[in-house]
């Protein structure tokens, strides 16, 4: 990874706090080139971004990035692209800063640290799969997974904290992905998605001490202690163990942290390998071509906060030579060699095992009625009302409160599948999200006013040709440009057969095919945020 023309800044205060830190002493035992890592740990990270390939103007975004001196990350493997900006993280200025913020706020790109993109590359989720992001907030990896899935399948983004769930929902809606369901559970106790099918792929980006993030979180130097990892180990093992439970046979899970401490990394993998006979640790190095990595540690010495050795489970080095040798398949990202932070990841596959017969005697179980705020498929009456307003739509639509969202066929499959309850002793037909605690479904596209679908909102405008063909009107380029500039225009620009229309519509033009939401009354007013307007103007002609 290169940064042409980037001014790298060192901070002497960081070095003062780091020189005698416990973290520096720890890394000597964990890294063969600890000194090289230490010397680069004071450089500010570059700003890195990922372009959303699901948006219609992704090519224009890439052209703009090139025009401001950004360079593509050649090692990135996935849909879309990732880029290194020619300035430090948070260092954009002037018009570049303004447009960068707007591109992020409208979901056209995601500002994300380079190494945090790697676990999703290793997971390699596919279109049509059922995927779980177990510890999802704030959602940068969730949106990346959604890009891999290309609008097909289902992605459950789970977050333990309700407050952080709200942040996750905001970022999912910003990204405008239709495949995502947001749930609110402790990952160690998250219920099965449906029946006995299991997930195809699961990401466990576990909470950790963040010892690999010194370049963006310099306070780590003074705050990190060995006891932090010791205290998190049991939870990390619990998360990964539950993830394996939720996998279908043949499914895969990626466990990752931004920690360098083997107690949070290899020791967790060692515990899972000891506990379970239905898993194997796989080699994911082929997905890491171009990424600077080292093999996982095969032995380590846990210490207390006085850096004195500790003995005994669960933190001790592997109990057998066989497990120790397998740990070499883990991956430690050498961030200092690629101008990034440090990261750890391991890929586990669930073995195919003999499964007992599925319970066929279904007990009658009555679940409480869903509240009007619960996400559920659009009923026949509401769907007919939607299509009357916007035209025929063959996409799965969902309703939650006063909003309509677009989802996927796989979501409907889950809704209609039998769902295990009461520890698997009884099963019920679908028609409920339970036992999952669902917070959000799909991408919101429309409002409901006075009991009927009203208008296509900005977040759904990029899908307008799929969901609202009847509500798109073509106007002149001059009039469209005036709307983008924030002007209110006269209705006489409308086609002769549309002069009497009112309410929420979408307009396009010859040079601006991407539909723009407007409100038509006595005049025509654009219904867009300042960020959407900035992006449309800033990307014009690119």
Image (cartoon, grey):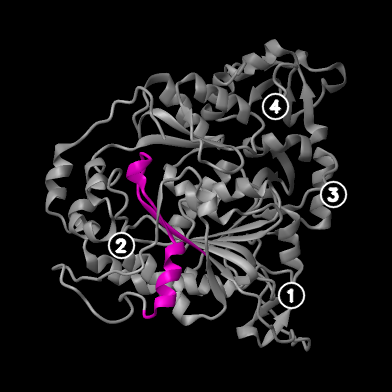
Which of pointers 1 and 3 lies earlier in the amino acid sequence? 3
Which of pointers 4 and 2 lies earlier in the amino acid sequence? 2
Residue drawn 35% across the image and 22% down it: 5
Q: Given contact means CB atoms under 8 Å apart, are the residues at marks 3 and 2 in contact?
A: no
Label 2 sits on a secondary structure element that is loop
What residue sits right under mark 1 in the picture?
418
> Relative to 109, is 226 above or below?
below
How far apart in space, not on screen, are marks 4 and 3 (Cα)? 26 Å
Which of pointers 4 and 3 lies earlier in the amino acid sequence? 3
How far apart in space, not on screen, are marks 1 and 3 (Cα)? 27 Å
Q: How crowded is mark 2: few (under 14 residues within 10 Å), some or many (20 or more)?
A: many
What residue sits right under mark 2 in the picture?
261
Q: Give the range drawn in magenta.
A: 319-347
How far apart in space, not on screen, are marks 4 and 2 (Cα)? 48 Å
Residue 535 spot, x, y in % from top left:
55, 25
Q: Is residue 537 magenta?
A: no
**From where the camera sits, is residue 139 visible?**
no
Which of pointers 2 and 1 lies earlier in the amino acid sequence? 2
Q: Indicate which disc residue 384 carries.
A: 3
Quarter of the image containing the C terminus? Answer: top right
Eye-nearest disc, 4 or 2: 2
Q: From the viewer's perspective, tell me whether residue 410 is left or right of residue 133.
A: right
Quarter of the image containing the N terminus? Answer: top left
What residue sits right under mark 4 in the picture?
514
Residue 316 spot, x, y in % from top left:
30, 76
Which of pointers 1 and 4 lies earlier in the amino acid sequence? 1
Q: Is residue 321 magenta?
A: yes
């Amino acid at each position: 990874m290169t940064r042409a023309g980037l001014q790298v800044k060192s901070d002497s205060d960081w070095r003062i706090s780091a020189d005698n830190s416990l973290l520096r002493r720890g890394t000597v035992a964990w890294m063969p080139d600890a000194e090289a890592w230490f010397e680069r740990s004071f450089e500010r990270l570059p700003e890195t971004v990922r372009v959303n390939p699901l948006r219609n103007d992704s090519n224009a975004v890439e052209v703009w990035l090139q025009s401001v001196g950004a360079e593509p990350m050649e090692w990135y493997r996935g849909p879309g692209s990732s880029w290194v900006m020619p300035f430090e993280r948070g260092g954009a200025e002037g018009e570049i800063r303004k447009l960068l913020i707007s591109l992020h706020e409208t979901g056209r790109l995601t500002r994300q640290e380079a190494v945090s993109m790697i676990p999703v590359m290793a997971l390699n989720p596919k279109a049509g799969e059922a995927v779980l992001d177990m510890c999802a907030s704030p959602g940068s990896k969730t949106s990346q997974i959604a890009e891999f899935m290309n609008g097909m399948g289902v992605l459950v983004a789970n977050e333990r904290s309700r407050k952080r769930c709200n942040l996750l929902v905001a970022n999912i809606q910003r990204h405008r992905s239709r495949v995502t369901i947001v749930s609110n559970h402790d990952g160690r106790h998250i219920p099965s998605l449906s029946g006995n099918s299991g997930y195809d792929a699961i990401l466990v980006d576990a909470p950790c001490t963040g010892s690999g993030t010194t370049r963006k979180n310099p306070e780590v130097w003074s705050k990190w202690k060995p006891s932090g990892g010791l205290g998190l180990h049991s939870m990390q093992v619990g998360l990964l163990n539950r993830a394996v439970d939720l996998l279908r046979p043949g499914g895969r899970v990626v466990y990752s942290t931004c920690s360098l401490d083997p107690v949070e990394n290899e020791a967790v993998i060692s515990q899972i390998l000891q506990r379970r006979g239905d898993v194997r640790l796989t080699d994911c190095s082929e997905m890491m071509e171009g990424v600077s990595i080292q093999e996982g540690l095969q032995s380590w010495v846990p210490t207390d906060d006085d850096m004195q050795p500790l003995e005994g489970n669960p933190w001790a080095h592997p109990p057998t030579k066989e497990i120790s040798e397998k740990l070499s398949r883990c991956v430690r990202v050498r961030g200092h060699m690629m101008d990034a932070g440090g990261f750890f990841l391991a890929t586990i596959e669930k073995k195919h095992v003999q499964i007992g017969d599925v319970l066929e005697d279904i007990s009658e179980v009555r679940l409480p009625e869903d509240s009007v705020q619960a996400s559920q498929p659009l009923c026949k009456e509401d769907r007919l009302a939607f299509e009357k307003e916007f035209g025929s739509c063959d996409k799965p639509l969902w309703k939650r409160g006063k909003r309509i969202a677009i989802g996927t066929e796989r979501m409907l499959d889950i809704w209609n599948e039998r769902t295990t309850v009461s520890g698997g002793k009884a099963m019920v037909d679908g028609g409920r999200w339970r036992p999952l605690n669902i917070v959000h479904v799909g991408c919101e596209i429309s409002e409901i006013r006075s009991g009927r679908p009203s208008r296509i909102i900005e977040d759904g405008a990029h899908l307008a040709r799929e969901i609202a063909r009847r509500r798109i009107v073509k106007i002149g380029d001059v009039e469209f440009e005036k709307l983008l500039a924030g002007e209110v225009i006269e209705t006489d620009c409308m086609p002769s057969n549309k002069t009497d229309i009112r309410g929420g519509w979408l307009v396009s033009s010859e040079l601006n095919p991407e539909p723009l939401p407007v409100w038509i009354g006595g005049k025509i007013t654009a219904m867009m945020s300042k960020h959407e307007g900035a992006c449309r103007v800033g990307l014009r002609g690119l």
